[in-house]
Image (cartoon, rainbow, N blue to C red):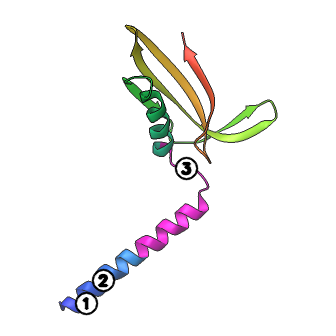
Amino acid sequence: MKCKDFLAGILTGIAAGIVVKEVIDRTSPYVSADTVLNGIKDEFKKEGPIDGSWIVMKTEPFENKMIFMDVYRGGISRIMNGELEQYEFAADATTGTVVELKKRA
């Protein structure tokens, strides 16, 4: 195998990967669930360390009075003043903005 043929194959693979990524980004208007969770965790970390977090990778419909959107659901847990605090959230899938935050008892 010639070096030129090998390099042409690698460049073709890279170009195909870039095209596929662009098509996926354009067809999915949603921010990735990992990005949303990391942003929420960063905000919670401003108040103190967190113990755990989770997020559902699939969006679900959300309605709040007259607002309709797709959201990611997830949760954060932490220890504050020796007590376990657990929060559940819903975040807009297109922007990552938290639209609902509930503290579990």
Q: Disc count in the image?
A: 3
Q: Pointer 2: residues within 10 angstroms few (<14), some, or many (20+)?
A: few
What quarter of the picture does the C terminus occupy? top right
- Residue designated by label 2: 9
Q: Which mark is first along the chain, 1 or 3?
A: 1
Query: At which x and y percent is residue 76?
Result: 46, 25
Please state if 32 lies on the left or on the right of 27 as rendered.
left
Please state if 58 lies on the left or on the right of 15 as rendered.
right
Element at label 3: loop
Work out whether 3 lies above or below 44.
Answer: below
Q: CA distance from mark 1 to mark 2?
A: 6 Å
- Residue designated by label 3: 31
Q: Residue at 57% x, 42% y: name it.
A: 96
Q: Residue at 48% x, 39% y: name it.
A: 39
Q: Which residues are magenta?
A: 16-33
Element at label 2: helix
- Residue designated by label 1: 5
Question: Magenta: predominant secondary structure element?
Answer: helix
Kind of residue at disc 1: Asp
Please state if 20 lies on the left or on the right of 97 as rendered.
left
